[in-house]
Amino acid sequence: MARPKVARTKRGERTRNHILGVTRKLLAQPGFRGVTLDQIAEETGTAKSSILWHFGTKEHLLLEVLDGIMRELETSYRQSYPDSLPLAKKMQLFIKDYVHMMEQYPELGTVFFGMLFDAKLISTIRDRIKEMYREYREMIVHHLADSGVPATEHLAAAVAAMFDGVFIQWYLDPQG
C-alpha cells in the first residue's frame, strides 16, 4: 500500500487537519473501536473518498493522529524543561505530562497497542510504528545526553519501555 497522499493546497491542508482533529476527538470517547470512516466523514462534513485520498486507509489516519500526539508531547517537553533542569526533575515532570496526556486521550494508547499487536496489520503501518519508536528513542538519547547522562540506545529503549509500562499500569488502574 502506498503512503498516504499529502495535501497540495491550503484548502487540502485545512481539510486534512480538520479530519485529524475530529478523529482525535472521536477516539478519545469511550467506544472508540466503533469509530468508522463513515462516522468520521459525517462528523467532518467530508466525503469518505476525501478521507481516503488524504490518508490512504483508516489505519494510516489513526497512526497520523497518534504520531501528532507524540510530537505534541515532545514539543511540550522541549519547551517546558530547560537543559539546566536536573534529569530527575525532568523525568518527574515528563511522567506528569504523560499521565495528563493519557487522561486527556484515554483511548489513544489502546488504539496504538491494538494496532501494534494486530496480526493483520499491513506492513507499512507496522514499519511506521517501528520508525516512531526509533524517533522516540533518539529523542530520549538526546534529552539524557543534554542532562549529562551517558546515553545509549539500550538505555533509551529501557526508558521507552518504562513509559509503555506506565501507560499499561494507568490503563489497568487509573487511580493507582
Image (cartoon, rainbow, N blue to C red):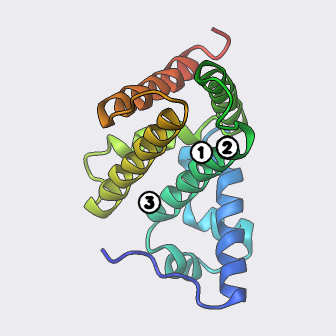
Contact, CB < 8 Å: mark 2 with mark 1? yes
User: Residue 115: x, y in percent?
Assistant: 39, 46
For the image shown, how many numbered marks are present on the structure? 3
Q: Distance between the residues labelled 1 and 3?
A: 13 Å
Q: Is residue 127 rendered to the left or right of residue 52? A: left
Q: Mark 3 points at which residue?
A: 59
Q: In which quarter of the image is residue 48?
A: bottom right
Q: Distance between the residues labelled 2 and 3?
A: 16 Å
Q: What element carries label 1?
A: helix
Q: Quadrant of residue 137?
A: top left
- For image coordinates 74% across by 75% down, the residue present is 45
Residue flagged by tag 1: what amino acid is it?
Answer: Phe
Q: Name the residue under label 1.
A: 32
Q: How crowded is mark 3: few (under 14 residues within 10 Å), some or many (20 or more)?
A: some
Mark 2 or 1: the one toward you: 2
From this view, report whether residue 164 is shown above or below residue 44: above
Disc on the earlier residue, 2 or 3: 2
Q: Distance between the residues labelled 2 and 1?
A: 7 Å
Image quadrant holding the C terminus, namely top right
Residue flagged by tag 3: what amino acid is it?
Answer: Glu
